[in-house]
Amino acid sequence: MSDINHDKVLETASSWLDQGHKVALATVVKTWGSAPRPAGSQLAVRGDGEFAGSVSGGCVEGAVISEALDAIKDRRTRKLSFGVSNDQAWTVGLACGGQIEIFVECVD
Amino acid sequence: MKRATLHALTAARLSGRPIVLATNIDSGEELLIDPTLAPKTSLDAAAREAALKDRSGAAEGDARAWFLNVFNPPLQMYVVGAVHIAQPLSRMAALSGFNVTVIDPRTAFATSERFPGLTLITEWPDEALANIALDMRSAVVTLTHDPKLDDPALAAALKSPAFYIGALGSKKTHAARLARLKALGFDDAALARIRGPVGLDIEAQTPAEIAVSILAQIIAQLRGAQA
């Protein structure tokens, strides 16, 4: 049985690279309160927008994928914060009331 | 992340080795740490602790902030005794992410009909465990009450770094068991690793309820909860 925390995200990212795709990784690095996924949870994003894994219960993946695609283009790392206290609460935020910090990096 | 780092991580996972990736979130600097080696730096020690608790998170190292991402191999559970309680316990443990192996030389008990889809070993526990490297991701639970089967398994577990060792049996049975193991040369500190009577005290009655109490105790031990 696969490791529930990491599933096969890294293996998927690795096979995408081997196929010649560009790949970025997003990792939950800090959580406060009732965050949906623990620190260490990962989302791999492919250059064409395909993705695997998760950093939340689906609440912020859209925004993270968009930042990951930008990271693939400019090769810079990013730190993202999401929470209900955020201005974006009604558009992108966590319904559970938790807060999360996500590190986004290009793999190269 | 560097491509070489990603490949090193996936190679470690493929071979079943634990590995910790330390990332400096400000600089992007990366270090791969083997948590099974004796720590040389405070960051190594923090990585080892994170791997033992199976918990990724922030750590200090060289006065800089690092994020430690723990990549542990799957948890292993070795259940000695293909008895009634072993049936719900092995299924619940598999759902919780454990690779489960059931050991019982009594072939009437250890059948694939009673334990579908699980690894069954129909050897004596000491023979079976001699071929298995119990590590810090292993839990051993004895359920037979029979000293001929339970004691050799407990002795093997006590000689290993298994994170959890539990033995089914009443307080009286457990006291007699500890006396036997003491006679084999295990001291009080070693014997204190055995959780017996096994499981959290939730007044469990049925085999499934007892399985819940055992699995809850194992998870509490894994996560470092006071239970």
Image (spheres, coloured by chain):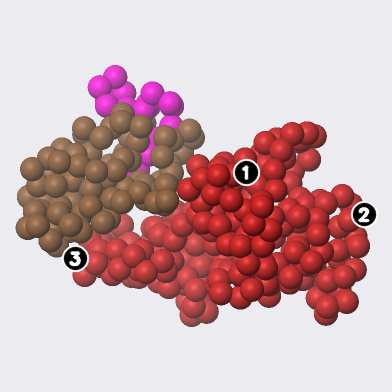
Real-space Cα distance between discs 3 and 1? 43 Å
Question: Dot 1: few (<14), some (14–19), or many (≥20) neighbours within 10 Å?
Answer: some
Q: From the viewer's perspective, is the residue at label 1 or at label 2 nearer? A: 1
For image coordinates 82% across by 64% down, the residue present is B147
* x and y percentages locating residue B111 in the rendered image: 59, 51
Q: Is residue A31 visible?
A: yes
Give, as a single range, the part of the protein colored magenta.
A84-105
Pointer 3 chain:
B
Whether discs 1 and 2 lie on one chain: the answer is yes
Real-space Cα distance between discs 1 and 2? 25 Å
Using the image, tell me which numbered label, if any, was put on residue B172: 2
| Residue at the extreme front of the image, as rendered | B108
For image coordinates 47% across by 66% down, the residue present is B47
Q: What element does badge 1 sit on?
A: helix
Q: In the picture shown, does residue A76 fall above or below B30? A: above
Residue B169 part of the magenta-drawn span: no
Query: Looking at the image, do the residues carrying marks 2 and 3 touch, with CB atoms under 8 Å apart?
Result: no
Q: What element does badge 3 sit on?
A: helix
For image coordinates 52% across by 79% down, the residue present is B38
Q: In the image, what residue type sits under mark 1? A: Gln
Using the image, tell me which numbered label, if any, was put on residue B3: 3
Pointer 2 chain:
B
A29, A15: nearer the viewer: A15
Whichever of labels 3 and 1 marks the residue nearer the N terminus, that label is 3
A5, B113: nearer the viewer: B113
